[in-house]
Image (tube, helix red, strand yellow):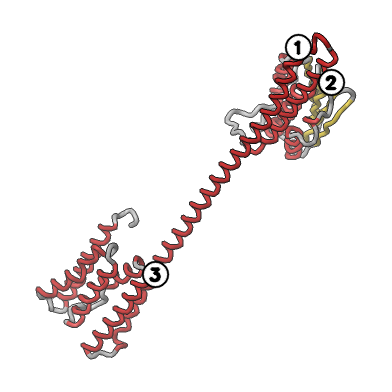
Amino acid sequence: MRRVPPSVVDAALAVGCFLSIMIMAVLSRRLEWWVAVLAAVNTLPLLWRRRFPLLVSTVTGISTGALFLTDSMGGIPGASLIATYGLASLSPPPRMLIGVLGTIAGFASAAALQHHQPLSYGPTAAAFVVAYALGAGARARRDRIAVLEERARRLAEEREVAAVRERERIAREMHDIVAHAMSLVVLQAEAGPVALRTDPARAERIFETISATTRDGLSQLRRVLLALRPEEAERHPQPGIESVPSLVEGVRQAGLDATFEERGEPRPCHSDLAVTAYRIVQEALSNTVRHAGATRVRVRVTWRDDALDLEVHDDGRGASAERGPGGHGLIGMRERVAVVGGRLVTGPEGTGFRVAASLPLAGALTDAGTPARPPAS
């Protein structure tokens, strides 16, 4: 019914009420031309009940009273009840109060003119009370919906304002970080060639300053961008243990002396565990390339009866500031290992840095029930 145009609904109600009056007139043998006119006056205003609810209620009320006085109604006054519902649903409280008083006055006038007991109008009065209640309930429901929509609109505007302010704040911070770091880098870089010819020790300190400045700037940018970092939707098949050698090869092509070693007999494992192993090695190698200043890195995969051991060991500076406990990479590694019930150990070892993880294989099978890849040659 909600998809039907309101004008069609009102026309159907008017026709239905008119036919109801005419049928009752036929059954009571009071079908006269003036009855048809009164019926039309009583029902035709329903076409405008949404635009002029008080006027329509008044006209239908007066014509309903006339039909009752001539004993032509013979039943529940449908048109007047519909008009009453519209009045209570669409009119503000003052106009609705006028309608209530008018209805009471109409009942009192009909009882006085027909010399009937007031209680004889009980069912009809109850029907009017129900119509008023339903209309008031519909109006209250619309008011609540309007309030909720307005509240949702304000919340959306507040969220948009907050998002704009946050973007402006991040833009300012990024500008300050980049401008400060790059200014220092440009200044030191311009002085570096001169110092290299006259004072090599000072030139070395300048280049160390450039390195420290850029690292600090990148670290600050990383912290600022963490709030904007979306989780990447991975639509392609997830890499697994079989992709670890390609990671090592990529590091080797970047200029590091990278080696891959696999021990033990590969066993079937769940895809989640395979992805976890790949991501751990990937993050460890990324840290080695970006932060360690290493020249060599070794990746070792060891298959045991109940666990898969991973080890990434480089000869870099060890636990630098970027690789400390506050780094996002190490936190991500710990979270991944904890999900599969494993253990992770990170820290300096000898002259380098070591990442070691042990992932349990007990009860782990691949999604398709196929074994893991064969041992590397």
Please say whether residue 372 is visible from this viewpoint. Answer: no
Q: Residue 293 occupies which quadrant of the picture?
A: top right
Looking at this view, name the residue that lies furthest to the left: 33
Looking at this view, name the residue that lies furthest to the right: 350
> Seen in the image, is 303 located left or right of residue 26?
right
- Alpha-carbon neighbours of circle 3 within 10 Å: few (<14), some, or many (≥20)? many
Q: Is residue 267 above or below residue 334?
A: above
**CA distance for labels 2 and 1:** 30 Å
Q: Which residue is mark 1?
A: 193
Q: Going from the N terminus, do you reach mark 3 or mark 2 first? A: 3
Closer to us: 84 or 374: 84
The three-letter code of the residue at mark 1 reads Pro
> Seen in the image, is 236 located left or right of residue 315?
left
Q: Residue 246 occupies which quadrant of the picture?
A: top right
Helix, strand or loop at mark 1: helix
Helix, strand or loop at mark 3: helix
The three-letter code of the residue at mark 3 reads Ala
Q: Position of residue 159 (x, y in %)?
A: 55, 47
Q: Which residue is mark 3?
A: 136
Q: Residue at x 61, y 33 (%)?
A: 232
Q: Which residue is mark 2?
A: 315
Q: Going from the N terminus, do you reach mark 3 or mark 1 first? A: 3
Q: Position of residue 135 (x, y in %)?
A: 37, 69
